[in-house]
Amino acid sequence: MSGQARGYDQGLLERLNRASLARSFIPQVDIDWDQTTTDAEYESLYSSWSLLEGSDLNGLLDGPARVTIVRYQQMNLMIFTELLERYALTAIVRLYETEHSEPFREYLGHFIKEESYHTTMFARAIAKIGATMPRRKPLPARPARLLLRWTFRLLNSFPSQRVRVGVTFAFLRYAEQISIYAHQAVQSKIGRKESFIRQVWACHALDESRHLVFDSMILERHRLARPLGWIPRYLAVFFAALLSLLLNANEIWAYRQAGAPVHLWQLPGLMWRTEASFKRRVFGLLAAMARGRTIAAGERGGVP
Protein backbone atom coordinates (compact mmCIF):
# COMPACT_ATOMS: atom_id res chain seq x y z
CA MET A 1 0.00 0.00 0.00
CA SER A 2 1.41 3.37 -0.93
CA GLY A 3 2.30 6.10 1.57
CA GLN A 4 -0.34 8.34 0.00
CA ALA A 5 -3.02 5.75 0.57
CA ARG A 6 -1.92 5.29 4.17
CA GLY A 7 -2.22 9.00 4.88
CA TYR A 8 1.13 10.47 3.83
CA ASP A 9 1.22 13.26 1.27
CA GLN A 10 3.87 12.07 -1.18
CA GLY A 11 4.10 15.47 -2.85
CA LEU A 12 4.82 17.16 0.46
CA LEU A 13 7.41 14.51 1.32
CA GLU A 14 9.15 15.17 -2.00
CA ARG A 15 9.18 18.92 -1.26
CA LEU A 16 10.61 18.24 2.19
CA ASN A 17 13.32 16.12 0.59
CA ARG A 18 14.22 18.89 -1.86
CA ALA A 19 14.28 21.46 0.95
CA SER A 20 16.57 19.27 3.06
CA LEU A 21 18.99 19.03 0.15
CA ALA A 22 18.86 22.75 -0.65
CA ARG A 23 18.45 24.39 2.76
CA SER A 24 20.07 22.21 5.40
CA PHE A 25 23.45 22.91 6.97
CA ILE A 26 26.65 21.25 8.20
CA PRO A 27 27.57 22.68 11.61
CA GLN A 28 31.32 22.26 11.17
CA VAL A 29 31.16 24.19 7.88
CA ASP A 30 28.25 26.61 7.98
CA ILE A 31 28.72 28.06 11.46
CA ASP A 32 31.60 30.47 12.03
CA TRP A 33 33.07 28.95 15.16
CA ASP A 34 35.54 31.83 15.49
CA GLN A 35 32.70 34.29 16.03
CA THR A 36 31.58 35.38 19.51
CA THR A 37 28.54 36.86 21.20
CA THR A 38 29.31 40.07 23.07
CA ASP A 39 28.36 40.75 26.67
CA ALA A 40 25.92 43.43 25.47
CA GLU A 41 24.27 40.92 23.14
CA TYR A 42 23.92 38.37 25.93
CA GLU A 43 22.49 40.97 28.30
CA SER A 44 19.93 42.08 25.69
CA LEU A 45 18.27 38.66 25.99
CA TYR A 46 17.79 38.85 29.75
CA SER A 47 14.43 40.64 29.78
CA SER A 48 12.82 38.16 27.38
CA TRP A 49 14.41 35.01 28.87
CA SER A 50 14.54 35.48 32.65
CA LEU A 51 12.19 33.85 35.17
CA LEU A 52 12.80 36.86 37.43
CA GLU A 53 11.49 39.42 34.93
CA GLY A 54 8.66 41.35 36.58
CA SER A 55 9.43 40.09 40.10
CA ASP A 56 10.94 41.89 43.09
CA LEU A 57 14.02 39.71 42.71
CA ASN A 58 14.84 41.13 39.28
CA GLY A 59 16.69 44.15 40.65
CA LEU A 60 19.18 41.99 42.54
CA LEU A 61 21.29 41.29 39.46
CA ASP A 62 23.61 43.84 37.87
CA GLY A 63 24.79 43.82 34.25
CA PRO A 64 27.67 41.33 34.61
CA ALA A 65 25.47 38.97 36.63
CA ARG A 66 22.79 39.12 33.93
CA VAL A 67 25.36 38.26 31.29
CA THR A 68 26.34 35.22 33.36
CA ILE A 69 22.70 34.18 33.73
CA VAL A 70 22.02 34.44 29.99
CA ARG A 71 25.11 32.39 29.19
CA TYR A 72 23.85 29.72 31.57
CA GLN A 73 20.35 29.96 30.02
CA GLN A 74 21.71 29.44 26.52
CA MET A 75 23.76 26.43 27.58
CA ASN A 76 20.79 25.10 29.56
CA LEU A 77 18.42 25.02 26.59
CA MET A 78 21.17 23.68 24.33
CA ILE A 79 21.93 20.84 26.76
CA PHE A 80 18.30 19.80 26.97
CA THR A 81 17.82 20.06 23.20
CA GLU A 82 20.98 18.10 22.45
CA LEU A 83 20.05 15.32 24.87
CA LEU A 84 16.45 15.15 23.67
CA GLU A 85 17.46 14.85 20.02
CA ARG A 86 20.15 12.29 20.84
CA TYR A 87 17.85 9.96 22.76
CA ALA A 88 14.90 10.53 20.43
CA LEU A 89 16.92 9.00 17.60
CA THR A 90 16.28 5.58 19.14
CA ALA A 91 12.56 6.07 18.50
CA ILE A 92 12.85 7.87 15.16
CA VAL A 93 14.83 5.05 13.55
CA ARG A 94 11.96 2.65 14.25
CA LEU A 95 9.77 4.57 11.80
CA TYR A 96 11.51 2.65 9.00
CA GLU A 97 9.31 -0.27 10.08
CA THR A 98 6.08 1.65 9.49
CA GLU A 99 6.31 2.73 5.84
CA HIS A 100 8.09 1.59 2.67
CA SER A 101 7.49 4.42 0.21
CA GLU A 102 10.70 5.88 -1.22
CA PRO A 103 9.93 9.58 -0.45
CA PHE A 104 9.10 8.72 3.16
CA ARG A 105 12.25 6.70 3.73
CA GLU A 106 14.35 9.34 1.99
CA TYR A 107 13.02 12.09 4.24
CA LEU A 108 13.39 9.94 7.33
CA GLY A 109 17.06 9.64 6.40
CA HIS A 110 17.32 13.44 6.15
CA PHE A 111 15.55 13.79 9.50
CA ILE A 112 17.95 11.41 11.25
CA LYS A 113 20.99 13.04 9.65
CA GLU A 114 19.84 16.51 10.65
CA GLU A 115 19.13 15.50 14.25
CA SER A 116 22.61 13.94 14.41
CA TYR A 117 24.14 17.19 13.12
CA HIS A 118 22.21 19.12 15.76
CA THR A 119 23.65 17.05 18.60
CA THR A 120 27.15 17.78 17.30
CA MET A 121 26.39 21.49 16.93
CA PHE A 122 24.96 21.90 20.41
CA ALA A 123 27.73 19.91 22.07
CA ARG A 124 30.31 22.19 20.45
CA ALA A 125 28.30 25.34 21.21
CA ILE A 126 27.93 24.39 24.89
CA ALA A 127 31.67 23.85 25.15
CA LYS A 128 32.39 27.17 23.44
CA ILE A 129 30.08 29.17 25.72
CA GLY A 130 31.36 27.30 28.77
CA ALA A 131 34.93 28.27 27.87
CA THR A 132 33.97 31.94 28.33
CA MET A 133 33.08 31.16 31.98
CA PRO A 134 36.23 29.45 33.27
CA ARG A 135 35.60 30.34 36.92
CA ARG A 136 31.96 29.24 36.92
CA LYS A 137 30.65 25.78 37.73
CA PRO A 138 29.26 23.82 34.77
CA LEU A 139 25.50 23.36 34.62
CA PRO A 140 24.31 20.07 36.15
CA ALA A 141 23.46 17.90 33.12
CA ARG A 142 23.16 14.48 34.75
CA PRO A 143 19.48 14.82 35.86
CA ALA A 144 18.44 15.78 32.32
CA ARG A 145 20.46 12.94 30.85
CA LEU A 146 18.83 10.42 33.17
CA LEU A 147 15.33 11.81 32.61
CA LEU A 148 15.57 11.71 28.82
CA ARG A 149 17.37 8.38 28.67
CA TRP A 150 14.68 6.69 30.76
CA THR A 151 11.85 8.59 29.06
CA PHE A 152 12.78 7.15 25.69
CA ARG A 153 13.49 3.71 27.10
CA LEU A 154 9.96 3.75 28.47
CA LEU A 155 8.46 5.10 25.25
CA ASN A 156 10.29 2.50 23.16
CA SER A 157 8.85 -0.26 25.35
CA PHE A 158 5.20 0.69 24.69
CA PRO A 159 3.49 -2.22 22.92
CA SER A 160 1.16 0.05 20.93
CA GLN A 161 2.91 1.56 17.93
CA ARG A 162 0.35 4.36 17.66
CA VAL A 163 0.81 5.37 21.30
CA ARG A 164 4.60 5.09 21.08
CA VAL A 165 4.88 7.16 17.93
CA GLY A 166 2.20 9.63 19.03
CA VAL A 167 3.90 10.42 22.34
CA THR A 168 7.37 10.58 20.81
CA PHE A 169 6.45 13.01 18.04
CA ALA A 170 4.20 15.19 20.20
CA PHE A 171 7.14 15.50 22.61
CA LEU A 172 9.53 16.25 19.74
CA ARG A 173 7.15 18.82 18.27
CA TYR A 174 7.05 20.62 21.64
CA ALA A 175 10.85 20.82 21.81
CA GLU A 176 11.20 21.84 18.16
CA GLN A 177 8.69 24.63 18.58
CA ILE A 178 10.66 25.92 21.58
CA SER A 179 13.81 25.99 19.44
CA ILE A 180 12.04 28.17 16.90
CA TYR A 181 10.85 30.47 19.69
CA ALA A 182 14.47 30.67 20.88
CA HIS A 183 15.61 31.60 17.37
CA GLN A 184 12.92 34.27 17.10
CA ALA A 185 13.79 35.71 20.53
CA VAL A 186 17.51 35.87 19.73
CA GLN A 187 16.86 37.31 16.28
CA SER A 188 14.64 40.06 17.74
CA LYS A 189 17.28 41.14 20.28
CA ILE A 190 20.59 40.60 18.49
CA GLY A 191 20.80 42.41 15.19
CA ARG A 192 24.27 41.19 14.24
CA LYS A 193 23.80 38.10 12.07
CA GLU A 194 27.36 36.97 12.76
CA SER A 195 26.76 36.74 16.52
CA PHE A 196 27.61 33.18 17.53
CA ILE A 197 24.41 32.20 19.35
CA ARG A 198 22.29 33.83 16.66
CA GLN A 199 24.01 31.61 14.08
CA VAL A 200 23.39 28.49 16.17
CA TRP A 201 19.67 29.09 16.72
CA ALA A 202 19.12 30.25 13.13
CA CYS A 203 20.68 27.08 11.71
CA HIS A 204 18.70 24.91 14.08
CA ALA A 205 15.40 26.63 13.25
CA LEU A 206 16.03 26.12 9.53
CA ASP A 207 15.84 22.35 9.97
CA GLU A 208 13.33 22.28 12.81
CA SER A 209 10.71 24.16 10.82
CA ARG A 210 10.75 21.30 8.30
CA HIS A 211 10.68 18.77 11.11
CA LEU A 212 7.49 20.34 12.45
CA VAL A 213 5.81 19.68 9.11
CA PHE A 214 6.97 16.06 9.21
CA ASP A 215 5.85 15.72 12.84
CA SER A 216 2.33 16.76 11.87
CA MET A 217 2.23 14.13 9.14
CA ILE A 218 3.41 11.42 11.53
CA LEU A 219 0.96 12.42 14.26
CA GLU A 220 -1.96 12.47 11.82
CA ARG A 221 -1.04 9.06 10.44
CA HIS A 222 -0.73 7.48 13.92
CA ARG A 223 -3.69 9.22 15.54
CA LEU A 224 -5.80 7.02 17.79
CA ALA A 225 -9.57 6.85 17.44
CA ARG A 226 -11.41 9.74 19.14
CA PRO A 227 -12.23 8.07 22.50
CA LEU A 228 -8.54 7.29 23.03
CA GLY A 229 -6.95 10.21 21.21
CA TRP A 230 -6.11 12.03 24.44
CA ILE A 231 -3.72 9.31 25.67
CA PRO A 232 -0.60 10.15 23.59
CA ARG A 233 -1.16 13.89 24.03
CA TYR A 234 -1.44 13.72 27.81
CA LEU A 235 1.55 11.43 28.12
CA ALA A 236 3.56 13.86 25.97
CA VAL A 237 2.37 16.76 28.15
CA PHE A 238 3.51 14.86 31.24
CA PHE A 239 7.01 14.32 29.84
CA ALA A 240 7.20 17.88 28.51
CA ALA A 241 6.15 19.29 31.91
CA LEU A 242 8.85 17.23 33.65
CA LEU A 243 11.40 18.52 31.16
CA SER A 244 10.25 22.11 31.66
CA LEU A 245 10.44 21.84 35.44
CA LEU A 246 13.95 20.41 35.30
CA LEU A 247 15.11 23.03 32.82
CA ASN A 248 13.78 25.86 34.96
CA ALA A 249 15.18 24.28 38.13
CA ASN A 250 18.57 24.54 36.46
CA GLU A 251 17.86 28.23 35.94
CA ILE A 252 17.27 28.64 39.69
CA TRP A 253 20.64 26.98 40.21
CA ALA A 254 22.17 29.52 37.78
CA TYR A 255 20.70 32.49 39.67
CA ARG A 256 22.28 31.21 42.86
CA GLN A 257 25.64 30.87 41.10
CA ALA A 258 25.34 34.54 40.09
CA GLY A 259 24.63 35.57 43.67
CA ALA A 260 20.83 35.98 43.67
CA PRO A 261 19.05 34.50 46.74
CA VAL A 262 16.53 32.50 44.72
CA HIS A 263 15.31 29.13 46.01
CA LEU A 264 13.81 26.08 44.37
CA TRP A 265 10.56 26.41 46.34
CA GLN A 266 9.98 29.73 44.55
CA LEU A 267 10.05 28.09 41.11
CA PRO A 268 6.28 27.51 40.62
CA GLY A 269 5.46 31.12 41.48
CA LEU A 270 8.21 32.47 39.25
CA MET A 271 7.06 30.32 36.34
CA TRP A 272 3.49 31.52 36.84
CA ARG A 273 4.27 35.24 37.18
CA THR A 274 7.27 35.84 34.92
CA GLU A 275 6.82 38.59 32.34
CA ALA A 276 9.65 37.39 30.09
CA SER A 277 8.22 37.03 26.56
CA PHE A 278 10.19 33.90 25.63
CA LYS A 279 9.15 32.17 28.87
CA ARG A 280 5.51 33.16 28.39
CA ARG A 281 5.51 31.69 24.88
CA VAL A 282 7.04 28.43 26.09
CA PHE A 283 4.61 28.03 28.99
CA GLY A 284 1.74 28.97 26.68
CA LEU A 285 2.86 26.26 24.28
CA LEU A 286 2.66 23.65 27.03
CA ALA A 287 -0.85 24.81 27.96
CA ALA A 288 -1.94 24.71 24.31
CA MET A 289 -0.48 21.23 23.98
CA ALA A 290 -2.55 20.07 26.96
CA ARG A 291 -5.69 21.43 25.26
CA GLY A 292 -4.83 19.72 21.98
CA ARG A 293 -4.09 22.92 20.08
CA THR A 294 -1.09 23.48 17.80
CA ILE A 295 0.56 26.90 17.71
CA ALA A 296 2.14 27.74 14.35
CA ALA A 297 5.77 28.74 14.45
CA GLY A 298 5.74 31.16 11.55
CA GLU A 299 8.76 29.42 10.03
CA ARG A 300 8.68 27.10 7.03
CA GLY A 301 12.33 26.23 6.48
CA GLY A 302 12.11 26.64 2.75
CA VAL A 303 9.23 24.20 2.28
CA PRO A 304 7.11 25.55 -0.60
Image: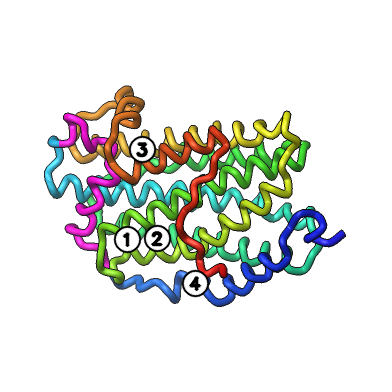
Please identify the quarter of the rendering in which residue 274 is found. top left
In this rendering, the label closer to the viewer, 3 or 2: 2
User: Mark 4 to mark 3: distance in Å?
Assistant: 30 Å
Query: Which residue does the image show at 36% across and 51% down from the upper left?
Result: 75
Element type where label 4 sits in the image:
loop
Label located before the other in sequence (4 or 2): 4
Look at mark 2 in the image and give the residue it sits on. 201
The region drawn magenta spans: 36-58
Label located before the other in sequence (4 or 3): 4
The reply to whether dot 3 and dot 2 touch (C-beta < 8 Å) is no
Give how far across and how far down residue 301 sits, in percent: 50, 66
Amino acid type shown at disc 1 = Gln
Label located before the other in sequence (1 or 2): 1
User: Mark 1 to mark 2: distance in Å?
Assistant: 9 Å
User: Mark 4 to mark 1: distance in Å?
Assistant: 18 Å
Look at mark 4 in the image and give the residue it sits on. 25
Query: Which residue does the image show at 48% across and 37% down from the upper left?
Result: 286
Crowding at dot 4, Cα within 10 Å, few <14 / some 14-19 / many 20+, comes out as: some
User: Mark 3 to mark 2: distance in Å?
Assistant: 20 Å
Look at mark 1 in the image and give the residue it sits on. 187
Give how far across and how far down residue 30 sits, in percent: 43, 74
Amino acid type shown at disc 3 = Asn
Amino acid type shown at disc 2 = Trp
Please identify the quarter of the rendering in which residue 153 is found. top right
Amino acid type shown at disc 4 = Phe
| Res 250 label | 3
